[in-house]
Amino acid sequence: MKSFPPARIRNVALVGHGGAGKTTLAEALLYCSGAINRQGRVEDGTTTTDFDPEEVKRGISLSLALAPFEHDGYKINLLDTPGYADFVGDVHAALRVADLAVFVVSAVEGVEVQTEAAWRIAAQLDVPRMIFVNKLDRERASFERTLDELREKFGAGVAPLELPIGEELSFRGVADLLTDTAYFYEGGPDAKGRATPGTIPDDMADREHTVHDNLVEGIVVADDDLMERYLEGETISPKELEDTLALGVDQASVFPVVCGSAVKLVGIDRLAQFICEIGPSPQRRPPVKVRAGDGETEIASDPDGPALAFVFKTVADPYVGKVTFFKTLSGTVRPDAQLTNPRTHADERLHGLFTMRGKEQDTLSEVPAGDIGAVAKLSDTGTGDTLAPKGTPVVVPTIQALEPALSIAIVPRSKGDEDKLMIGLHRLQDEDPALRVSRNDETKQTLLSGMGETHLSIVTERLARKFGVEVNTEEVRVPYRETITAQAEAEGKYKKQTGGHGQFGVAFLRVEPLDRGAGFEFVDKIVGGSIPRQFIPAVEKGIAEAMATGGVFGFPVVDVRVTCFDGKYHPVDSSEMSFKMAGSLGFREAMAKASPVLLEPISMLEVVVPVAHQGDVMGDLNARRGRVQGTESAGTGEQIITALVPTSEVMRYAIDLRSLTGGRGRFTLEHDHYDLLPSHLTDRVTKAMAESAK
Ligand SMILES: Nc1nc2c(ncn2[C@@H]2O[C@H](COP(=O)(O)OP(=O)(O)OP(=O)(O)O)[C@@H](O)[C@H]2O)c(=O)[nH]1
Ligand SMILES: [Mg+2]
């Protein structure tokens, strides 16, 4: 693909709720601009941007995909993003590099949960926004209803530039409010989405005039000079209106609304045109704030400045290796450029530069400021990293890490696959900042943590497809622990007399409960050499090992003081080994007599939900044995609830909260402390433990 100056580049993210038609719209834009010859369909798995086998199988987008195309002398770097909540990390990544977000909203479903979630992210990042009301050809589509919802949710900045001509089956074109012209799309498939201009149908002329006047008034208020001329009765030219509108878009104070159908190719060419004409070029965006040493400075999008690139996405390919997607923030990145990653201090050589349209690579001769490119085989650079010239270690604030919400435990299906599994997981973690891999030594499980069930099942599918490791998933075990509630004593005796050299050691032990979190304390009260000094550490070691391997119920033992107050030895048969055994046996016996109980982990849960859901969420927390610690307003109609909840009750909270709030809640969980498990639950836990050991 040839190189474009920054003024001719548009970085556009398609965002919105799952199924609104983003991928179909990306396909339509590529097709109408001539970048592809065939309009693929999501249902057939033939679209450009849903190319992953996992995406094809499910018919939904799972990760952001780049699809550049040319329109009218501009290069539009389209970023198709997933609408499903589990993959919101990629929406965030796309919005970090987009200069315009096009919200795709279905005229049937209207504004949905993820539309609002993406809006919040775009607002937070100050990304200019416009809206494409899609699916106007569908039954029960309504532009009016959708527009009302948009205004209600996103405010007075929402400004329609078009009205649909006809709706549902009779949807055939759009009326342009700036120029008072109708565009009809009735040329059939051969027209490839090209419109025929005409006059606005009589039956909608009145309405068109009203909306037109509203729009013009909405635009001219932003400019005193225009306002004055307008009030004096002058007709403001569409070009002038458009320029003023573009300023409002730049400032993310005006959100133009256009409409059409991605499947029927209605309004698609016009959307591309709007993107070029009123969409901000990278140069019109405010300079990027970067950290330089201890201070902060700003970097303008200047192709002649020092090269600076921001990595927003990494994809692990088992054959090509790692592909790194970046946006050049300043300067011009050329093949063989040598840049440094200030985070890892790695010197990276950017060999071949290319762009990708879906899965197809296309060579680039350079990636100037504002443009997006890709490079393969960087050694030590991941998503969110900055690449800067050696000696100028500036760092762009990284992509905010997502806290995983759900965990599963995985085991490789074939025994010898442990190493392959770890390599695969490591590589997948590289491309997916929302994925965490950890090992719990207490429960002896390898845990995979992510954003939700779909996310985690995609990860296991990818492990199999990309790295040839099949895994079984298990329920995550709760790391229960044991402790005692009374004092007890026991004699630990180890004696073996088989043939020649025997084994002999005796340790008298006393166990006492300690405060929560105190751990293990060993007290040596041996006097008069009843156990020789050199063997006392062995007694302690034996106890420690017994505690770790599990007490009466099979869980690790904590918060116990063990005092060794007497013992016996044999001058020939006693050894370290025999005292270790004595310690271990004595401890087990004393523990059993000391009223052992189970401890369960308690988590601190923080839930953010719309006020309307607060009652439901608190009621549900009660049912989970939760103790609400406080509630406070998060502003914007949301409430923050903090509660201490037994960890076992919130292992799948990600799924439960989603269904409880229709996806409108979010939460974080953090281990807080251990507490006594209510005795009526002990049976259930020990039974489950016995089951899982089978
Ligand atoms: N009738 C009609 N159907 C559409 C239109 N746009 C998309 N669809 C259909 O809506 C469904 C979802 O479309 P996608 O393009 O996959 O939606 P998406 O927004 O990419 O969904 P996610 O990737 O899951 O976020 C598909 O069956 C499309 O064929 C449209 O304009 N008209
Ligand atoms: Mg999609």
Image: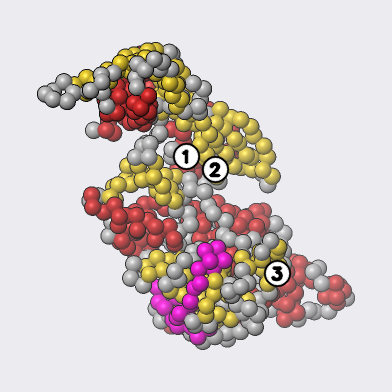
Q: Which percent across, then down, holds residue 136?
A: 53, 65
CB contact under 8 Å: marks 2 and 1: yes
The tag earlier along the polypeptide, 1 or 3, is: 3
Q: Depth-wise, is mark 3 or mark 2 nearer the camera?
A: 3
Q: Is residue 443 above or below residue 536?
A: below
According to the picture, the residue beneath numbered tag 2 turns out to be: 667
The magenta segment: 341-366
Determine crowd level at label 3: few under 14, some 14-19, many 20+ residues with C-alpha closer than 10 A: few
Name the amino acid, label 2: Phe
Determine crowd level at label 2: few under 14, some 14-19, many 20+ residues with C-alpha closer than 10 A: some
Q: Is residue 64 above or below residue 595?
A: below
Residue at x 38% of width, y 69% of height: 321
The image quadrant that residue 480 belongs to is top left
Q: Which percent across, then down, holds residue 361?
A: 42, 78
Numbered circle sitting on residue 559? none
Q: Which percent across, then down, holds residue 176?
A: 64, 75
Separation of residues labelled 1 and 3 (CA atoms): 41 Å
Query: What colour scheme does the image use?
Result: secondary structure
Residue 430 or residue 76, whichever sits in front: 430
Residue at x 54% of width, y 42% of height: 668
Numbered circle sitting on residue 298? 3
Numbered circle sitting on residue 653? 1
The tag earlier along the polypeptide, 3 or 2, is: 3
Q: In the rendered view of the protein, which quadrant contains the C terminus? A: top left
Residue at x 80% of width, y 79% of height: 235
Residue 403 visible somewhere in the drawing:
yes
The tag earlier along the polypeptide, 2 or 1, is: 1
Q: Which percent across, then down, holds residue 204?
A: 64, 69
Name the amino acid, label 3: Glu
Query: Number of callouts in the render?
Result: 3
Determine crowd level at label 1: few under 14, some 14-19, many 20+ residues with C-alpha closer than 10 A: many
Residue 249 visible somewhere in the drawing:
no
